[in-house]
Image (tube, rainbow, N blue to C red):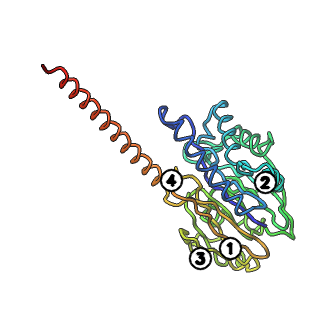
Amino acid sequence: VRILMVADPQLVGIQDESQIFGGITRWDLDRYLSKTFHHAVNNFEPDVILFLGDLLDEGSKASKEEYQSYIKRFRAIFQSTAPVSSFFYGCITAFLSASFQHVYIPGDNDVGGEAYDMKTDAKVKRFNRNFLHSDSTHTSSVTKVKFIDFLRVNLYVELMAQQSSHDAFHFLLNHMSILSRSRPEIHSLLERTKADLIIVAHSHNARLYSCLECLSRPELFRGQFPFKGGIQQIDSYESFHFQLSNRSVLHEVMVPTCSYRMGVPHMGYGAAVATGDVRYSILWTPPRYPQLHLMLAAAVCIALLLVIKLLSDLLNAFARRRHFSLP
């Protein structure tokens, strides 16, 4: 199973953006996300695409009209295939895209739940209606893709009612980190789900949390002391190998943001290939701000040259006029 992970795209909204330059910034980020996403999809050819929350920057507070405009932009950006020049190739990629499965997880920017932005049933229903095609606050918590059950967990680490298969691998999906929470809080969750791998987002950085003895010694959950293991920052092209049969280690993959507006130097998409084990890596995307700075510098230079040319022409015209006016 080939798994592509999209974290924190946070499409730029209207309320918090400049009224003068907002149209330009929204257009540039949408274009960046569209190009990088389509490159990732067309080269990696995933079986399932996981959207790990914070899909919209202002999803929690947007008006009805604003929200619908954001949804329209989201669908235009993250359609399954990129625009193609060949009709024949377009038909093939459109056919292949029908086999993609999509899993959507809400983030705090989508439905609230962080600081003073309260999570409400109305926000959850709006998210589910537009992304999960359901008007309920309770939707199916399990998406089955071949031999893997993807279990959706909500922001407060409460597993929904539906049970997963006993003969499948269990991948827990949540927007915020699970293993960083208090031990008693997650003891019941991991005990009930028999998690083989956890996939999260939210921090905007790429990290790997390895928890030793989390599954093999459940009595450790009852204490408040930290688990054995550690957090590894990922900022290179290295690949990681997770042995799902090794129940002495539980890994939590934290996927980096794919947006250049999140204040971090590295952006990308998570990519994993699951057989009996999992191989995981990051598809890093190019930084955008150096390109924008270069374009701005070029625009300033061109503007200065035009001003110099204009002044030169004016001076030459004035000199010629003065020359012909002399007796």
Q: Which residue is mark 1?
A: 250
Residue type pointed to by label 1: Leu
Instruction: Indicate which label's residue lies in the foreground, 2 or 3.
Output: 2
Question: Where is residue 326 drawn, in percent x and y?
Answer: 14, 21
Q: Which residue is mark 3?
A: 229
Q: Alpha-carbon neighbours of circle 1 within 10 Å: few (<14), some, or many (≥20)?
A: many
Q: Which residue is mark 4?
A: 288
Residue type pointed to by label 3: Gly
Is 41 placed left or right of 94 in the picture?
left
Q: Mark on residue 89? A: 2
Q: Give 143 or 46, whichever is nearer the viewer.
A: 46
Vertical side of 193 occupied by 311: above or below = above
Which residue is at a point 65% across and 60% down the rendered structure image? Answer: 200
> Among all residues in the image, which is located at the extreme front?
327
Question: Where is residue 187 drawn, in percent x and y?
Answer: 70, 67
- Dot 1: element: strand
Instruction: Indicate which label's residue lies in the foreground, 4 or 3.
Output: 4
Indicate the quadrant where residue 41 lies: bottom right
Question: Where is residue 261 drawn, in percent x and y?
Answer: 52, 49
- Dot 4: element: loop
Q: Alpha-carbon neighbours of circle 2 within 10 Å: few (<14), some, or many (≥20)?
A: few
Residue type pointed to by label 4: Arg
Vertical side of 207 occupied by 319: above or below = above
Mark 2 or mark 3, which has the lower sequence index? 2
Residue type pointed to by label 2: Tyr
> CA gap, disc 4 to disc 3?
35 Å
